Amino acid sequence: MSMLMFMLDQSKLEKLGKIRALGVNPYPYTFDQTHHADEIAARFDELSGKTVSVAGRILRMRKMGKLHFIDLLDGSGKLQIMVKEDAAQKSDIDVLKLLDLGDIIGVKGSVIKTRAGEVSVELGSLTLLSKSLRTMPEKFHGLSDVESRYRQRYLDLIVNPEARKIFRTRTAVISYIRDFLNARKYLEVETPIIQPQYGGANAQPFKTHHNFLGTDMYLRIAPELYLKRLIIGGFERVYEFAKNFRNESVDAKHNPEFTMLEFYEAYGDYNTLMNLTEEMLGGLAKKLYGGYEVTYQGSKISFKPPFRRISLVDEIKKKSGIDISELTDESAAKVAKDEKLETSIRNAYHVADALFDKYVQDEITDPAFVIDYPGYMCALTKDKRGNPKLSERFELFMAGKEFGNCYSELTDPIEQRRKFEEQAMEKKKGDTEAPPSDEDFLEAIEYGMPPTAGMGIGIDRLVMLFADVPSLKEVILFPTVKPEQRQGEPSDEA
């Protein structure tokens, strides 16, 4: 007998054989499902006494004399099936006695209420749709099994109603944003995931090789430079729900594969997108929860516009006495040492970022736009009008986390080339997150790019907030986890 057979539930295998001996196909092709659990509950008065066909997975079975009760889980929720042995066909009872938790069945029968008042379907006929060959977990969502929940998300979704609710919330968030942008004449587009050159953010990429072209390629870290090409090409408002890939840590706030919303609007600036962001997120809160107030991990968060504006330079100077607009790479090293900052790279960019983490970030609860970033932190951004040391950039923060990043986009090709060259120098100095210069993008912008505002919002983090969960892994269906060593598989050391 194969290793696989030993891993399967032997009693289930025996029942499978008996089912086949009855002449029943345990894995049929189709079933005519006419109703779902939520519909039957909502329309009971209308459907009472009528025949429906339902299908789903068995979560619970219990027997009371000649009555059988089955809890069935379908895509909408849970429904009780009642079986009267005296009224059912013998062939169906024979199959019923061979069923287990986890089996998928179809039931045709009448909508009723039991003596206990529970809406149910009384079995008229039974169809086995899939015989489960593994034992279902009893308390799969226990804290001790948190990694198993992510590895085997399908089981988590079966036994954990909260998990299903989270991913319905995710769909609702994305649907609302898509409708919001479409209504404002934004065009949804798709840009390359495999790119000859990565850019648009500071991050380490995943590298691969294209065999046919004989060249190294990269998984994108951001869609930004391709979306800007579309603005140059004449599309005035574009957006993309983009899968991005960054070769970074895996924790409650980071996953190497994640979803970003990026949108760009020609002839606007970062003030334009502050207003749009306030309207979009305020509307999203009202759509999901009926008002501007949302509870996240015990804290009340208000999405009522206008959002607060916080000057990064002023706030850090007020808290620490350090003027980050005057930082240089040389002075930054001393600041990092004096402030005991947790940053391995001690240039001005990373030190300013670490100072913000230390003094400002955790104190932001309600949505706020952090503005006034020093120019050395913004390679793709226009200088702030009236103060060339700063840039027209804001980041959206709430609940102590970053959720979005926006620029008045740099459209001067000569200045853009200079800033790309500065980034290339940082890369040579050892900053592994600094992106390389992109000559193809520079060529595109040299044809002329209109004034443009662009923004990226982390969809996974946004769903995390609106679903009120503490970790990104709860809102990504299949988060990145270390591969599990399975029985019979060779180890890495082998």
Image (cartoon, rainbow, N blue to C red):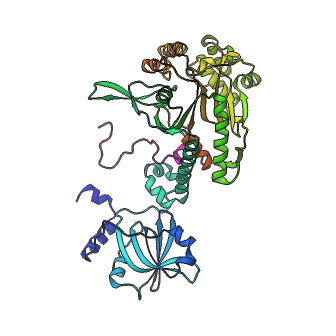
**Which residue is drawn at the image coordinates 64% and 52% (left, top)?**
287
- Relative horizontal placement of residue 205, taking residue 24 as reference (left or right): right
Tell me, yes or no, if residue 357 can be seen here. no
Give yes or no for residue 475 being in the magenta stretch. yes
Up-down relation of residue 479 to residue 425 (above or below): below
Q: Where is residue 28 in the image (x, y as percent from the top left)?
A: 30, 67
Up-down relation of residue 463 to residue 406 (above or below): below
- Relative horizontal placement of residue 358, taking residue 239 as reference (left or right): right
Q: Is the magenta stretch mostly helix, strand or loop?
A: loop
Location of the N terminus by quadrant is bottom left
Up-down relation of residue 283 to residue 34 (above or below): above
**Which residue is drawn at the image coordinates 69% and 25% (left, top)?**
312
**In the displayed image of the protein, which residue is found farthest to the top?**
330
* Residue nearest the observer in this picture, 118 or 260: 260
Q: Where is residue 247 in the image (x, y as percent from the top left)?
A: 45, 31
Q: What stretch is highlighted in magenta?
A: 471-481
Up-down relation of residue 250 to residue 446 (above or below): below
* Residue nearest the observer in this picture, 71 or 180: 180
